[in-house]
């Protein structure tokens, strides 16, 4: 996983997908276990809206490519985004099972399909439901999550994390080739925050163990 300023994301994905050992490529901002989720206002058309500052929020992710496959997320109902979900098509969204339970309680996740919500500046149709992904810690509070296509929300962020999935035993071995593929598009483009997802998760566990150790010293 690595971060770069968003430019020609499509060309970058194609270059990364051609690298030996890469099985799928996607992009997102924010990213679980990196920036963590960023709460955004969301709503359900037709439902009363609370006073300003008290409306519902969810962690909204701006994604592109085969993000869900690359991150190993489980599709529970509906479909993933496709290339046809672009700036010229009807706005769509994918929600997680926690979002579905929060806004359409008592129903199976598939009941969210076809429902409408407002997120990332547009009213959108729900076309898929995925399993919840913890955004900053394995035991963190489960916040509702929604996903929108990057091509339908270009102003959402100027930063993009590319996610590469690989069957290689040492995923970090892809780093030099991946960075070279991006540099071939723009040698002046800064690339930062490169790490495997397992390393990101382990970092949060290390921080938690350290917190327990410090607490033990002063208990």
Image: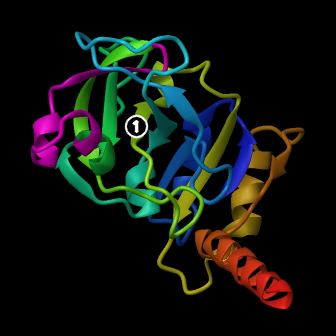
Q: Report the number of discs.
A: 1
Determine which quarter of the picture holds residue 176.
bottom right
At a point 85% along the width and 89% down the height, the residue shown is 217
Residue 60 lies, with reference to residue 67, above or below; the image says above
Query: Magenta stretch: residue 104 in it?
Result: yes
Mark 1 element type? strand
Q: Nearer the viewer, residue 205 or 124?
A: 205
From this viewpoint, which residue is outermost toward the front?
219
Q: Nearer the viewer, residue 209 or 152?
A: 209
At a point 67% along the width and 56% down the height, the residue shown is 34
From this viewpoint, which residue is outermost toward the right?
188
Residue 86 relative to residue 197: left or right = left
- Residue 62 in picture, x, y percent from top left: 51, 34
Determine which quarter of the picture holds residue 1.
bottom right
Q: Nearer the viewer, residue 36 or 168?
A: 36
Residue 46 lies, with reference to residue 77, above or below; the image says above
The colour mode here is rainbow
Q: Which residues are magenta?
A: 101-121
Q: Nearer the viewer, residue 103 or 179?
A: 103
- Residue 140 in picture, x, y percent from top left: 52, 62
Query: Magenta stretch: residue 167 in it?
Result: no
- Residue 187 in picture, x, y percent from top left: 86, 42
At a point 48% along the width and 14% down the height, the residue shown is 121
Residue 53 lies, with reference to residue 59, above or below; the image says above
Question: Can residue 81 be seen?
Answer: no
> In the rendered image, which quarter contains the C terminus?
bottom right
The residue where tag 1 is placed is 146
């Amino acid at each position: 996983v690595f971060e770069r300023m968003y430019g020609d994301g499509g060309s970058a994905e194609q270059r990364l997908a051609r690298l030996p050992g890469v099985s799928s490529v996607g992009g997102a901002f924010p990213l679980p276990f990196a920036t963590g989720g960023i709460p955004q206002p969301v709503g359900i058309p037709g439902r009363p809206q609370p006073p300003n500052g008290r409306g519902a929020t969810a962690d909204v992710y701006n994604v592109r490519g085969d993000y869900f496959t690359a991150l190993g997320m489980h599709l529970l109902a509906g479909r993933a985004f496709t290339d046809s979900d672009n700036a010229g098509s009807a706005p769509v969204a994918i929600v997680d099972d926690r979002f579905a339970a929060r806004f359409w309680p008592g129903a199976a996740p598939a009941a969210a399909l076809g429902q409408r919500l407002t997120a990332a500046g547009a009213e959108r149709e729900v076309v898929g439901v995925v399993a919840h992904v913890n955004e900053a810690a394995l035991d963190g509070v489960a916040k509702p999550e929604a996903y929108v296509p990057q091509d339908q929300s270009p102003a959402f962020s100027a930063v993009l994390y590319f996610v590469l999935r690989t069957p290689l035993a040492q995923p970090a071995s892809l780093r030099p080739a991946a960075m070279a593929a991006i540099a071939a598009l723009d040698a002046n483009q800064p690339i930062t925050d490169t790490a495997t997802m397992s390393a990101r998760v382990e970092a949060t566990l290390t921080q938690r163990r350290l917190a327990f150790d410090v607490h033990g010293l002063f208990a």
